[in-house]
């Protein structure tokens, strides 16, 4: 558009006209008019266009999708825990019908052993975490 209107000239023409005391007519005040001696100032191009903006809008950032994945994983884990709990409850109720039977006594001893192993694993995990925290704190003090 600048080339078509011959508006490539900068403010040099305006400064020389104004310096001579020559008044600008109405056409000179409108930079887009054919008789204008002023150049058009182009606005800077946007960083991205409409299509890129739409793609950006509809493409979810990884953090959001990661949060959704973590949320759905927690729901699935909770459902699995509920199912396991209900299964254990049902099994306990089966053996509670005749608590003096050999099968019930064996089941109870297995459950006790399982609970002990789980408690030991939890304790070992917590000890490891504590040792790691103490090591990090000691490293921070050395720095």
Image (cartoon, rainbow, N blue to C red):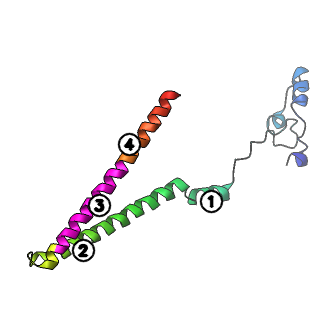
The residue to which callout 1 is attached is 55
Q: Nearer the viewer, mark 1 or mark 2?
A: 2
Residue 50 in sight: yes
Q: CA distance from mark 4 to mark 2?
A: 34 Å
Residue 120 is inside the magenta segment: yes
Q: Residue at x 46, y 32 (%)?
A: 138
Q: 35 or 126: nearer the eye?
A: 126
Q: Residue at x 23, y 70 (%)?
A: 110
The residue to which callout 4 is attached is 130
Q: CA distance from mark 1 to mark 2?
A: 47 Å
Give SS at disc 2.
helix
Vertical position of residue 29 compared to residue 73: above or below: above
Q: Quadrant of residue 18 in the image?
A: top right
Q: Nearer the viewer, mark 3 or mark 4?
A: 3
User: Which disc is residue 117 wearing?
Assistant: 3
Mark 3 neighbour density, 10 Å: few (under 14) some (14–19) many (20 or more): few
Q: Give whichever of discs 3 and 2 has the lower sequence position.
A: 2
Q: CA distance from mark 3 to mark 4?
A: 20 Å
- Number of labels in the image equals 4
Q: Residue at x 90, y 26 (%)?
A: 17
Give SS at disc 1.
helix
């Amino acid at each position: 558009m600048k080339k078509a209107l011959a508006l490539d000239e900068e403010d040099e023409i305006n400064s020389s006209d104004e310096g001579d005391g020559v008044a600008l007519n109405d056409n000179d005040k409108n930079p887009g008019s054919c008789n204008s001696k002023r150049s058009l100032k182009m606005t800077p191009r946007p960083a991205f266009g409409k299509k890129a903006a739409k793609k950006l809008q509809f493409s979810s950032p990884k953090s959001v999708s990661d949060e959704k994945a973590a949320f759905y994983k927690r729901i699935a884990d909770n459902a699995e825990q509920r199912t396991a709990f209900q299964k254990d409850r049902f099994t306990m109720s089966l053996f509670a019908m005749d608590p003096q039977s050999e099968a019930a006594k064996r089941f109870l001893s297995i459950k006790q052993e399982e609970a002990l192993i789980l408690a030991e694993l939890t304790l070992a995990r917590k000890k490891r975490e504590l040792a790691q925290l103490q090591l990090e704190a000691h490293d921070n003090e050395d720095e």
